[in-house]
Amino acid sequence: QDLTPTYLDLKYFPNLDDIHAESCKNLIKVECKNDNTNPINLLSSAFKDCINLTRVVGHYNLTGQETFKGCSKLILNEQPIYDKYGVNTFLNDVDVTNISIESTNLTGCFESCSSIGYDDFRFLMLRLTNNVTTIERMFKGCLEVSGALWYDMFRKLSSLTIMKDAFSGTGLNGIFYSRTSDYSYADDSTWGILDFLPKLKDAESAFSRTLIEWIDNNVFAPRLVNGVLTYSSIVNVTNMFASCMNLKTCVNTRATNIVSGKLSSETFFINLR
């Protein structure tokens, strides 16, 4: 078997239908044209188990599952690129990666990509759309995704039903936000992190083995929606926070100063139905 490191230059083939290079152990870099209007499609398992792949430069459209699963050396962009452009815009530069997302099922797309960083993660989360229904195992085992949760990180995922194991084994940390004390359905700045997921059913092991620090009694609390008391749609929270060794309970996750508290039976046994 030829294990000579391989660089695949496809910049001069802007109209490729798709790329499929599963289990190419010697592939280290792919470069395509960075065209904002003409991304290259990546089907299911396009680069799965390309264990030496470090970069995919250009603009790509995710259309399937397990696209980069097992690409443990892969990063999307170097930190200076994010410092220059941020994470919420098309990166119009050389030696950059842009991602669009067409698939509704993103199961395992970046599973075990243990080198992608926190800003790579933020960059990807901001490209999710309300067409996505499943992110099962999407970032499982992404060890370098080490940074804080934010209260509206699921803002664009109103159709999501499954996030089983989505973030397990990452370095995500900080506060698992509940609603503010002046919660209003009309003002989404007062919502909690799960309020942006009205169709979520399966959250099994979603945040297991992470570094989340704080949770409170209102995490699954029902809320008033147009005057109707509405309970969480989640039916499976098995091991949702299992082995989160830093996790503590507090009175209010939205308080300016976090004060330790205790979870009551309401949290899991009454608020979830």
Image (spheres, rainbow, N blue to C red):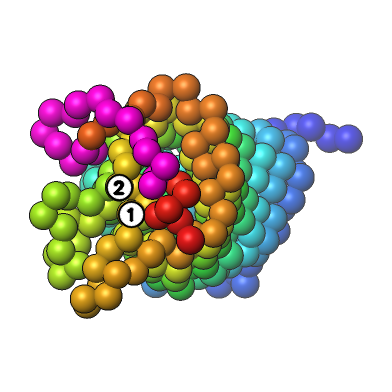
> What SS does tag 1 mark?
loop
Of residues 40 and 140, the one nearer the viewer is 140
Residue 184 seen in this snapshot: yes
Q: Which residues are magenta?
A: 252-267
Which label belongs to residue 221? 1
Q: Residues within 10 Å of mark 1 (few under 14, many from 20)?
A: many
Residue 36, visible in the rendered structure:
no
Tell me which corner region of the image, top left, top right, bottom left or bottom right, holds residue 81.
top left
The image position of residue 235, as x and y in percent, is 54, 59
Whether residue 113 is in magenta: the answer is no
The amino acid type, in three-letter code, at marker 2 is Asn
**Which three-letter amino acid code belongs to the residue tagged 1?**
Ala
Please tell me which residue lies in front, 121 or 75.
Answer: 121
Q: Residue at x 11, y 34 (%)?
A: 256
Question: Nearest the camera: 123 or 207?
Answer: 207
Residue extending farthest to the top is 245
Q: Which residue is mark 2?
A: 218
Point out residue 77 in the picture as x, y percentages from the top left corner.
40, 40
Query: The N terminus appears in which quarter of the rendering?
Result: top right
